[in-house]
């Protein structure tokens, strides 16, 4: 199987109006412009960072469509369309495809953990309904689903899933899939603090929430490590970026990312309840980490 993705793709927030009730389409344009201007290679709306579980089907369609329109072909858009059932997943996927999405990121059903045979049937049904690539969203902490390296390979062979975003944090397993199952599925890193390790391993792409806040630094790291093989430069960049990633993984992720984009001047409104704003001391801590990395923040 040829590689589907290269570079850093930003896991995107869903901007809401100040009262949290509606999608902020102008805010989506601002997010897309900020990320793309930083040199990031793609946008991934509609995932965990985008609070997809707090949105109606209509809102999810609208958010994906707004990101596709905002990107305007400048970078690929991988739209998050996973849902609890196959029919709703197909409905969201068909809508994103019709809107011009380049690919789909689909989390498996995440309440009643499916068996592997059910996973195969689910993704096969979606892949037969659409004509664009599918990225499997591996997030065991949320889904309860743990696949073996061999099952990742089968997923690619038997369903047409082209890649998977790994937000599992099991680097030995990721390494095994990367080396042993590459003919069937492309392994993309999706665990912030493993980004350096994954790129050094040879992973060709990653989906990274921090890229919504600090796209320039993320793009520079990819260039230094994956393209130029400049290890000293990559280490210098990672020393700045890693503390930010550790912070993001230490708090509610969507809330931390939304705080970060606000601090760098592209606010995205509140998170939806029950997620609460970061406490003032944590907000100040994130500001300090950004400024230590050389990133300008706003009042």
Image (cartoon, rainbow, N blue to C red):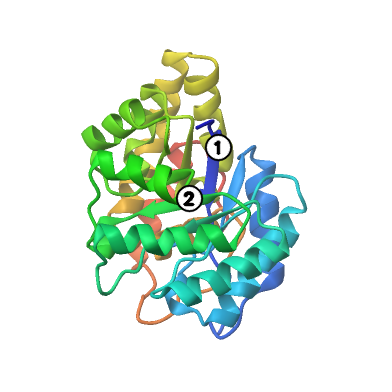
Q: Position of residue 260 (x, y in %)?
A: 48, 56
Secondary structure, mark 2, is: strand
Q: Which residue is mark 1?
A: 5
* Front position in the image: 61 or 273: 61
Crowd class of label 2 (few under 14; some 14 to 19; many from 20; radius 10 Å): many
- Quadrant of the image occupied by residue 140: bottom left
Badge 1: how crowded within 10 Å, few (<14), some, or many (20+)?
some
Foreground residue among 87 and 72: 87
Question: Residue 289: in sight, yes or no?
Answer: no
Residue under the point 47% across and 64% down = 125
Front residue of 142 and 181: 181
* Position in image of residue 165 (x %, y %): 41, 47
Q: Quadrant of residue 25?
A: bottom right
Residue 70 visible within the image? yes
Q: Is residue 261 left or right of residue 116?
A: right
- Residue lying farthest right? 72
- Are dots 2 and 1 in contact, CB under 8 Å? yes
Mark 1, secondary structure of its residue? loop
Q: Position of residue 181 (x, y in %)?
A: 35, 32
- Residue 37 x/y as whole percent: 69, 43
Quarter of the image for the C terminus: give it.
bottom right
Q: Is residue 146 above or below residue 60?
A: above
What residue lies at 26% left-to-right and 39% top-to-bottom? 149
Is residue 283 placed above or below 247 in the rendered structure?
below
Distance in Å between CA atoms under marks 2 and 1 = 10 Å
Which mark is first along the chain, 1 or 2?
Answer: 1
Q: Which mark is residue 135?
A: 2
User: Residue 215, which numbered label?
Assistant: none
């Amino acid at each position: 199987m040829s590689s589907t993705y290269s570079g850093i793709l930003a896991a995107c927030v869903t901007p809401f109006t100040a009262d949290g009730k509606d999608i902020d389409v102008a805010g989506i344009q601002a997010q897309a412009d900020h990320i793309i201007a930083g040199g990031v290679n793609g946008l991934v709306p509609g995932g965990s960072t985008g609070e997809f579980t707090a949105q109606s089907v209509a809102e999810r369609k609208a958010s994906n469509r707004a990101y596709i329109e905002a990107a305007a072909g400048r970078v690929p858009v991988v739209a998050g369309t996973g849902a609890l059932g196959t029919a709703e997943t197909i409905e969201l996927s068909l809508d994103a495809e019709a809107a011009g999405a380049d690919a789909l990121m689909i989390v498996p059903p995440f309440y009643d953990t499916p068996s592997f045979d059910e996973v195969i049937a689910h993704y096969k049904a979606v892949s037969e309904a659409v004509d664009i690539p599918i990225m499997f969203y591996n997030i065991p902490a949320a889904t309860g689903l743990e696949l073996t390296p061999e099952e990742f390979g089968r997923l690619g062979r038997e369903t047409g899933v082209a890649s998977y975003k790994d937000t599992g944090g099991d680097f030995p397993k990721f390494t095994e899939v990367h080396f042993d199952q590459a003919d069937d599925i492309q392994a993309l890193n999706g665990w912030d603090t493993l980004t350096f390790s994954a790129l050094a391993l040879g992973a060709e792409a990653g989906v990274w929430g921090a890229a919504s806040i600090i796209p320039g630094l993320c793009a520079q790291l990819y260039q230094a490590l994956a393209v130029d093989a400049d290890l000293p430069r990559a280490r210098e960049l990672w020393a700045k970026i890693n503390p930010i990633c550790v912070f993001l993984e230490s708090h509610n992720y969507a809330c931390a990312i939304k705080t970060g984009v606000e601090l760098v001047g592209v606010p995205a409104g509140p998170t939806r309840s029950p997620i609460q704003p970061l406490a003032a001391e944590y907000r100040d801590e994130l500001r300090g980490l950004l400024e230590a990395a050389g990133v300008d923040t706003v009042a």
